[in-house]
Each structure stands twice: as C-alpha cells, then as structure tokens.
Image: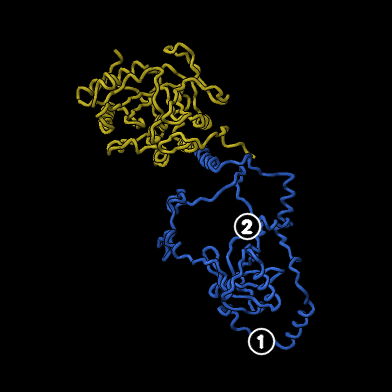
Amino acid sequence: MEAPLTRVEFTHIAKVIYPEAGITKFQIINYYIRIAPRILPFLGGRPIVLTRFPYGVGARGFYEKNAPMGTPDWVETFPHYSETAGRMIHYVVCNDLDTLLWLANLDALEIHLLLSTVRSPRNPDLLFIDLDPESPATTADAARIALLIRDRLASQGVRISVKTSGKRGLHLVVPLVPGLTYGEVRGFVHGMGRELSRENALVASEAPGPANPGKVFIDYGQNSQGKTMVAPYSLRATPRATVSTPLSWDEVGKGINPGDFHIQSVPARGEDPWEGILLHPQGLPPGGGEG
Amino acid sequence: MSEEKKSSRRRPIWSGAISIGLVNVPVKVYPMTRDMSVSFRLLHRKDGQPLRYERVCTRDGKVIPWEETVKGFEIRKNEFIVLENEELRAALPESDRRIRIDTFVHYLSLDPVYFENSFILVPDGTPDAYSLLYTVCEEQGEAGVGRFTLRTKEYPAVVHAYHGALVLTTLRYASEVIDPSSFEELKALSGPGTKELDLAKKIIRDLSGDLDIADYHDTYRERVFTLIERKRSGETFRVEKPKAEEVKELMVALEETVAKLGKQ
C-alpha cells in the first residue's frame, strides 16, 4: 500500500460556502486541487494571509494573518515582527499541495500574499499596481489604463503581467530582481501614476475611492511592507465565486468581463498567461525614488 | 451454498394476472434465475483505489455529466438521429398487467433455443384459480403460450407447471434466433455410412443416463473463491474508509494534480 495522496482529511465537504451560487466546500477543494499547478509557484516561499469564511460567503469572514490554532506541524510558518502591529506574526507559508488543500479545507477561500519572500522580507520581489475603477468608471476603463501602462513600460524594456482582481479592478505585476526597496518601487509606481494622470483624465494618482468618482486610481501605496495582494488564481468571496485570473494582453485588448472568470470556468482555461513569469525577474528603469 | 431468502423478504418484479379468455389468475412475478458469475471491481494498481467509469467526450476527452447527455441512433457512420426520452417513452409498449394466453401447447413441443429467462409465478390473493391452472397444466403437460410485457419490452412467453409452481418463461422472437441454414458448411453435409452410424449409436447407448444438473459446477468460480480465501489471510487491498462519492472524485482530481506537479 502506498502513502495516501494527501495528509489532509477533508471535512464537511457538503457545506455550502457560496449560498447564492450553491457552491459547496467540495467544489472549492476541487478547484484548488485542479488549479494547484498554476497557483503554487506564486505561493511558495512567501508569507500569506488568509481570509476565511467558515460560515459561508455573505456571513462575516475573517482576515487571518497568524497561522490558526491546530496548524499541522508539516505546514511551514514564518515568524516576523510586525512594526505596525507591534507583535510577532506567524505567517503561513504555502510551499506544497498539502498546505494548499489544508487551506481549502479551512474555508480559506481567499489567499493573499505578501510582496516579499521569506528570504528577504524587507524587500519586494513583486511590483504591484492595483487599478481600481471608481464608479461610474468600469473594468473597461481600468483595462484602457492597464494597456497604457503596459505600452509605457514596454518602451522602457519592462514586461508587466495582468490579472483580474476578481472584482471590478485589474492587477498589474512585475517580478523584480532582488535588492530593491519598497520605497523605490512605490516611488516608481507613484511617479508613473502622476505622469499618466497628466496625460489621461481617467487616471487618479493620489487619492483613492470616492474622492475621485469615475476615475481609475493607480494605487501605488500597496507597494509597502506588510501589504498584500490577492494571489493569482485565488478565489474571491464574491457571490459568483470569481477568481483573480491571470490574463493575456490580447484578452485585455479585446475587452473582458471579470465575472466570466469564476470557479467553474478558470480551471478549464487553456494556456496559463502567467506561466513562468517568476523565472524572469526584472529591474526598474530610472523613474525616481520616493520623495 | 447461501440460504434461500424467506419469501416474505423478496419483492415481486411485476404483479398482474394471467388472462385466459375471460378467466383471470392474479399472480406476482419473481425472478427464478440469478447470475452467479464472479464479479470484480477494477482498482488502480498502485494504491488499490476503486475506479469508476465516466462518460467521456470522444473529441476532447472531457467528462460529460448525465444531464448533458441525449440518446442518439447512428443512421450512418458518425451521423445520428437524436431521440428524446419523452419520445422513447411514448413508444413503450403498454403494460396492461396481463399475461395474455393465446393458446395451449404441449410443453415438450417447445424448442428450448427460444427460451430466454424464467420467472416464478405466485398467487396474488386467493389461490383457487392459480391452483386450478397449475393442476391442469401439470396433469396434461400443457403450457399456455401468450404475451407478457416486462418493463420496456413485450415478450412471447410460455407458462408451465414446474415443481409445484407455475413458471413463466420469456421467449425470444423468431428474428432473434439465427437460422443454422445460413452456414455454408452445413448445406453440404453428406449422409454417413451404415457402419459408422451403427458404431455411433452404440456409443450413445453406452453413455446414456439421466441428467442431474447439480453434477455440474462452475469450476472457474470455485477456483477463484478458493484463491480469495487464501488471499484473505495474506495480502489484501482494502479501501481505508468508506468514502462519499465526492471524496472519491477529489481523490481522482488529486491524482491528476500530483502527476502534473511531479512533471513540473
């Protein structure tokens, strides 16, 4: 008899987690099993933060930075002193399939990741641009700005990748070479946002949210230590169980509806547009540090 | 040999009446035969997990759920007429809960090549009419021939007396039995010589006796069960825990993912 396929024992798999779509924990576990080869490269070696919904989407979920009670000893954790919280946080690190399945079994629908790895927690290894369209601006507006940013960075020799947030926005990511500081990355994104806001009336570079109705906010502040980004291929706690889905720029160019990317449709997608992007870390062109 | 079930615990597969002209004999129908062949589950060799069959699309290999399926009749290669379940249901023979007897024949005049499957008939309610029909068939060796509808199919059927019961045997349609004269080799049989024929008759006479069907055993089945008994004390593959269908499904998906991750 060989070893079992997983150390995780699935419990309460008939429990409905997304009441509106009638999606059960079985489907969530099944989703993470199927998407594991695509999501695991982005989770490995990196502190993550869980958003758990043991009572289902719609009921209150909770954001869990610390590894929960009863974390099995085979799950890697990363102790790190949080200056903002003033205490030690034991982050979960999801290096393998078993840990991913353990998370799914915990109803940790959303997996958020830090922009640093455990090796170098004070330096970002991902640049993250959160394009958040403020109503009445739409996903199509966010896509327009995303394409502008792509072209601008391409002219500077930087390739940026795009995913849906799983809600209305788009997320842009550049894997970075080691050694950059959060301040440098933040400054670069902020600078680019300011320039784009001068060129395009849709862009807001400073204040998020209702202060700028109808604009797409380039949220540079996300590039800070301790801030997180929802992982590519993570489920979202939305009624329809949408997924933060890596896209090809062709798809963005043709126009997308973020609601089309959900727990059923995403595993059936063909090529993974983000496959291997972490293997090609990039430097940033000079664009001004912070301040 | 397993113990026979108590009749009270058996469930009839059909109930209705034998109708002969204006006379009705209410009966319940029970299976008379059982399949004793050895059945196996197919397992994955490496971990002993039971496998199951899935309906897989012949083009892209995707598993198709039942609700997305429909019946198709192949009229030419790869060309189908789609038939909806309602349409097929409408074509079903009407089961009027009657075993209609058209005629009586001598039971031994029936050719067993037409016999398909036998059922035991048991009186439903008062046994008087049943008893009368049994007795008359038994005494005269007669059998009633007629029609009988079971589930989706109408059968020719014969009712005869056997071991204290009326037994119904469904018959094959004429078109379901192949005519041996269609074999070329059989058309040119030449008659044997007198000497050979006499010798053959002698051999047959020497071997003639009575048939006791209990003398025959399924020796394959017996050997397999002996093997199982031996293995039971040694190496066995056991499913660790009875698991819900859904958990099994997760394990199937998991196996694929583990294989993919292994390749990465």
Amino acid marked by disc 2: Arg
Badge 2 density bin: few <14, some 14–19, many ≥20, Cα 10 Å: few
Instruction: State the residue in front, A173 or B176.
Output: B176
Colour scheme shown: by chain
Residue at figure coordinates x 65%, y 57% from the top left: B10
Q: Is mark 1 on a helix, strand or loop?
A: loop
The amino acid pointed to by label 1 is Gly
Residue B11 is tagged as: 2
**Colour used to depict chain B in the structure image:** blue
Residue picked out by circle 1: B191
What secondary structure is marked by label 2?
Answer: loop
Q: Classify A97 as above or below A64.
A: below
The letter of the yellow chain is: A
Whether residue A53 is visible, yes or no, is yes
Q: Tell me the quarter of the picture where residue B15 sits.
A: bottom right
Do we see residue B255 in this rendering?
A: no
**Callouts 2 and 1 on one subunit:** yes
Of tags 2 and 1, the one toward the viewer is 2
Q: Position of residue A205 (x, y in %)?
A: 26, 21
**Chain identifier of the residue bearing label 1 in the image:** B
- Name above or below for residue A241 compared with residue B79: above
